[in-house]
Image: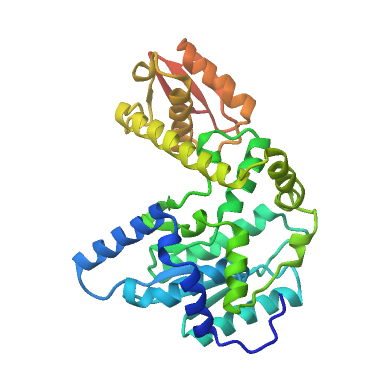
Amino acid sequence: MPTRKRIDWPAVAAAFAARIPHTALHPAAMLRAFAEYRREARKGGRPARWGLAFSGGADSLALLLIFWADGPGRWERDFIAMHFNHRLRGKAADADEKFCRAVCAALGVAFVTGRWRKAPKGASAAEARAARFDFFGREMRRRKIRLLWLAHQQDDIAESMLMRLARGSGTGGLAAPRPVQELGGGRLHLRPLLTLKKAAIVAALKKAGATWREDASNAGDDHFRNRVRRHVLPAWARAAGRDAVAGAALSRELLDEDDSALEAWLDELKPLDRRGRLDLGRLAGKPRALVRRALHRWLLAVRPETDLSRQGFNQLLAAVERGRDTRFSLGARGFALVRRGGLVFRKD
């Protein structure tokens, strides 16, 4: 949308938040935020600053407006908006950054930006995403920020699910994006807009008098997500004859519950010891889904840099299930050894 007219952003924020209040946001994300709030209140002292990813698009603008309108009174803390300039769209990318900076200045919100200094020519969406989240992670560590708000919404769930189905993801992949995502070092990503559809967000922004930035590359078919968004999702919704996006969001919730249950069951079994040995006896007779997860954990613990293919993983899984003495190559640096009811890593 055009962004030339002068806008009273505080008034827009108040009008938008009146249409989409905190009560419309995902309860799991909000409950976790309140838990963090209470935890810090018990510790006393100045509340920690929270981060908010701000691209300048409709979704992240909506999130910023909601938290600006209600945040100071509810959370009693400052937010910092984080913008990453991928530098892949020339002047348009710089205009995105300028827009974000202007909105934050009008709202009195702290703003920080990062730039992709060595952006590869023809960078993929995955590479751009990795660079963006590297920036978020660095800023969070540098500024001692534990919690970052992200603006994924319900359409993103359906798009991600269709994309991940195409590559054969399990419950862990199909349950993303999650409203609450715990990262290493005590950091959290919260996604409170997962209860809202893109159309509802855009409609509320328009009624509030907001403008935002549009990424022109989203109108093309170069990226897989764009093709799913522009062609697959509309056709799927028409064929379903019902609210397919809401159905995908419900499936995501159920898959997340199943995924968490399997993880909790595996935690109770404790098949991986401190020496990095996987006790196959504790997994005997258990469902294959549980053995698969245990093997994934083992690989991450002892050989995180392995380039084991899906076919190779399934062969190793079959060897683990058989339980017979086996030596299985994990690349140039070592191998997996099934021996005496356990699985261990040995260097070459």
Q: How many marks?
A: 0
The residue lying at 76 percent from left, 67 percent from top is 216
Residue 166 seen: yes
Residue 54 seen: no
> Whole-percent x and y of residue 289?
47, 24
Rendered view: 189 above or below 244: below
> Whole-percent x and y of residue 49?
37, 72
The residue lying at 70 percent from left, 46 percent from top is 233
Rendered view: 125 above or below 239: below
Determine which quarter of the picture holds residue 163.
top right
The residue lying at 64 percent from left, 82 percent from top is 98
**Nearer-the-camera pick, 75 or 97:** 75
Determine which quarter of the picture holds residue 309.
top right
Colour setup of the view: rainbow
Residue 275 appears left or right of 103: left
Residue 186 appears left or right of 124: left
Determine which quarter of the picture holds residue 119.
bottom right
The residue lying at 65 percent from left, 59 percent from top is 128
- Image quarter hosting the N terminus: bottom right
> Whole-percent x and y of residue 269?
32, 26
Residue 320 appears left or right of 244: left
Residue 328 appears left or right of 234: left
> Whole-percent x and y of residue 122?
78, 58
Rendered view: 279 above or below 59: above
Rendered view: 327 above or below 8: above
The residue lying furthest to the bottom in this view is 6
